Image (cartoon, helix red, strand yellow):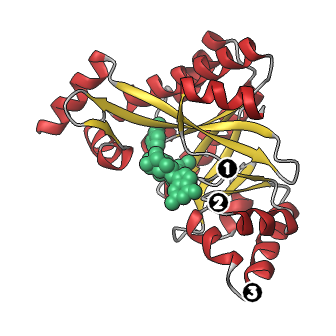
Amino acid sequence: MALEIALRGALDRGEFVLHYQPRIELPSEKLMGVEALVRWNNPECGLVLPSDFISIAEETGLIDELGIWVLRQACLDIQGLSTRLGYQLCVSVNLSPKQLLSPNLVAQVQHALDQAGMQPTCLELELTEGAFIHDMQASTLAMQQLKALGVRLAVDDFGAGHAGISYLQQFPIDVVKLDRTFITPNASEPHGHGFMKALSDMTHALGLHVVAEGVEDKATLDLLCQTQCDEAQGYFIAEPLPLSMLVTYVEKNG
Ligand code: G
Ligand code: G
Ligand code: MN
Ligand code: NA
């Protein structure tokens, strides 16, 4: 397939780049960390977004190699920046379902941390609900091994899929990232406040940290503060930024 060959070449030529979206603590608005989001800097068409290539990378098995590159680069970039600026940031990396079940993942994560000199508590791995429903036993084992390294595990896009609340109790998770389709309408809906408060209370009752994604306006950020949401990210706070622009952002906001 043409795209598969193109992606393979892109990996070999080093055309992938990471952008970083800031994530803040509420209500202090203190900068806590960033989410790494991969892009393909294609010399012909410019920046290609992951929605156009991640699924193909998954189908062709290229995701393993791309995933290792993302893990290593994210740790190197963010630990490098933290050391340089004297301000420790955490980094969150998205994992594909296939990566979670790869027998080499634990060693790859450990290697990425060692190479960057990063504390495991500064790395969070984001998994979607879909990642653990196929093989629950194998997924649980992989997650336990990752947790033994000291990294944090987050459920990404929570509420967007079909997996239920019981997953939060069943799997060794630390953080729930509420899907943006949940977040945006709440500030304008009559039961928005109650709904958000219930989600936040439930998450806390399970001993988990709750992060809101897709915060696009001040009203939403205020609502999240009022309902005790722990952290937030979204365009209203900052867009995903190339590393050079993240440096400027941290110097201003960190
Ligand atoms: O900005 P945005 O288009 O970056 O990201 C779209 C989707 O791509 C998100 O759902 C995100 O989880 C996924 N994604 C972004 N970066 C990575 C990555 O490094 N690995 C994997 N597996 N998915 C990613
Ligand atoms: O699925 P995941 O949460 O990993 O990916 C985050 C995606 O959401 C990325 O594509 C990122 O560019 C996008 N994103 C980040 N902030 C916002 C926002 O405030 N609004 C919308 N619509 N998308 C956002
Ligand atoms: Mn994510
Ligand atoms: Na998400």
Locate residue 91: give its quadrant. top right
Residue 134 on image: x %, y %: 47, 56
Q: Mark 1: is the Cβ under 8 angstroms from ligand 2?
A: yes
The amino acid sitting under disc 2 is Val
Q: Residue at x 28, y 17 (%)?
A: 12
Q: Mark 2: is the Cβ under 8 angstroms from ligand 2?
A: yes
Query: Viewer-nearest of labels 3 and 1?
Result: 1
Residue 7 on image: x %, y %: 24, 31
Residue 129 visible at all = no
Q: CA distance from mark 3 to mark 2?
A: 18 Å
Q: Residue at x 73, y 25 (%)?
A: 251
Name the residue furthest left: 2
Residue 212 versus residue 1: which sits nearer the camera?
212
Is disc 2 surrounded by few (<14), some (14 to 19) or many (20+) residues within 10 Å? many
The amino acid sitting under disc 1 is Ile
Image position of 172 (left or right of 240): right
Is disc 1 surrounded by few (<14), some (14 to 19) or many (20+) residues within 10 Å? some
Mark linked to residue 215? 2
Asked whether the residues under the numbered discs 1 and 2 touch, taking CB atoms below 8 Å apart as contact, a structural biologist would say yes
Mark linked to residue 191? 3
Is disc 3 surrounded by few (<14), some (14 to 19) or many (20+) residues within 10 Å? few
Residue 180 visible at all = yes
Asked whether the residues under the numbered discs 3 and 1 touch, taking CB atoms below 8 Å apart as contact, a structural biologist would say no
Task: For mark 1, give the secondary structure.
Answer: loop
Q: Which residue is mark 1?
A: 237
The amino acid sitting under disc 3 is His
Residue 202 on image: x %, y %: 81, 69
Locate residue 98: give its quadrant. top left
